Each structure stands twice: as structure tokens, then as C-alpha cells.
Image: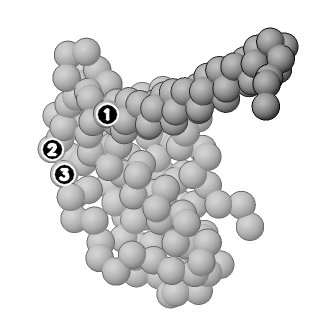
Amino acid sequence: MVLSLKTKFLTIVGLLFFVLLLVDCSNDKQAADQAKNDSTASCKKPMNPNGDSELALLMRDMMHSSENMKAMIREGKLPDTFPEAFMKIHTAKPTDSDTKKASFDAFADNYLNNLHALYNSPKDKHELTQNYNAVVNACVSCHTEHCPGPLKAINKLRITE
């Protein structure tokens, strides 16, 4: 069977197109994997070019804990153990020493009191939600005065019933 020049040409172009498509899809997967690695690596890198302070790292842990807790409370659950590490809020060193104004300790106490109330509340979904939102409100009140940068993210933590 003899193939015409046109048929050979179309066959070669089709094969090249197929090979290029495979290579492009492979590159897309590699790019997606790289983007995922970059995004998780950026979580491990300090956000502050001078390094992250104890307080900044503690606050990020509080944020992640609140995000996880939000999902649990929506299911009517609560973590079993109180996050004792959050008690370091009074002693953790801030990035900028001016961050901790005179009222900081009162805001920190308010946060911890609301957090204790949440962990001691009945396992009723409505009550858990109210107490969880009180913890979020404690964060908002402090960050309104001391460090407003994360307020947008903190406000997203609220659970609307």
C-alpha cells in the first residue's frame, strides 16, 4: 500500500501534535506540583524578612487552630484538649516591641477567658458556635487596636448560623 505525500504529511503532523500535547500536559502537571510545593514552602518560610517573632508564630498557630475548630464546631464537635501553648500569649516576644501596648494583656486575658469558656461549654452546637464566635470577637477587638493587618482573615473565621 502506497501512501500519498499528503497522507504522510498529515500523519506526521498528527503525531507531532499528539507528542506536543503529551509534553504540554506533562509540563502542566509539573508546574502544578511546583506551585503546590512553592505554596507549602512559603508557609514554612518567615513572612517577615527579619524573621518571625514568637508572637507572630503563636498568632499563626492560633489562626490555624481556629480554622480547624470552625470546621469541627460546624459538625458539633470540639477538640479534646485545650491548646496550652496559647497561654504563652503574654510572654511571647512581638516582632515590634511597640506592638504590645498597655492594653495588650487585657485583650490577651479576654481571648484566653473566651477560649476557656469555649472548651468548658456544653457540646450543644448552638452554644459551641456562640462561644467560638466570642473567641473570634476577642481576636477582632485586640487586632483592631494593636495589629489590624490580619483583621480581614480573622473576620472570615466567624460562623454564621
> Closer to the N terminus: mark 2 or mark 1?
1
Q: Which quarter of the rendering shows the C terminus?
A: bottom right
Which quadrant of the view contains residue 56?
top left
Q: Is residue 134 above or below residue 18?
A: below
Amino acid type, label 2: Thr
Q: Nearer the viewer, residue 44 or 53?
A: 44
Assess disc 3: are there few (<14), some (14-19) or many (≥20) residues with their C-alpha within 10 Å of its C-alpha: few
Closer to the camera: disc 1 or disc 3? 1
Q: Position of residue 149 (x, y in %)?
A: 48, 26
Of the numbered discs in the image, which one, if any, rests on residue 15? none
Please give the name of the residue rendered at 34% of the width and 60% of the height, measured from the top-left corner.
Answer: 112
- Pointer 3 with pointer 2, Cβ within 8 A: yes
Q: Along the horizontal axis of the image, is 73 left or right of 42?
A: right
Assess disc 2: are there few (<14), some (14-19) or many (≥20) residues with their C-alpha within 10 Å of its C-alpha: few
Residue topped by disc 3: 88
Q: Is residue 119 above or below residue 58?
A: below
Residue topped by disc 2: 91
Please give the name of the residue rendered at 45% of the width and 32% of the height, measured from the top-left corner.
Answer: 30
| Distance (Cα) linking label 2 and label 1 | 28 Å
Amino acid type, label 1: Ala
Q: Along the horizontal axis of the image, is 120 left or right of 160?
A: left
Q: Which quarter of the rendering shows the N terminus?
A: top right
Closer to the camera: disc 2 or disc 1? 1
Q: Nearer the viewer, residue 28 or 65?
A: 28
Residue topped by disc 1: 41
Q: Position of residue 35 (x, y in %)?
A: 45, 30
| Distance (Cα) linking label 3 and label 2 | 5 Å
Q: Which color scheme does this rendered protein use? A: one colour
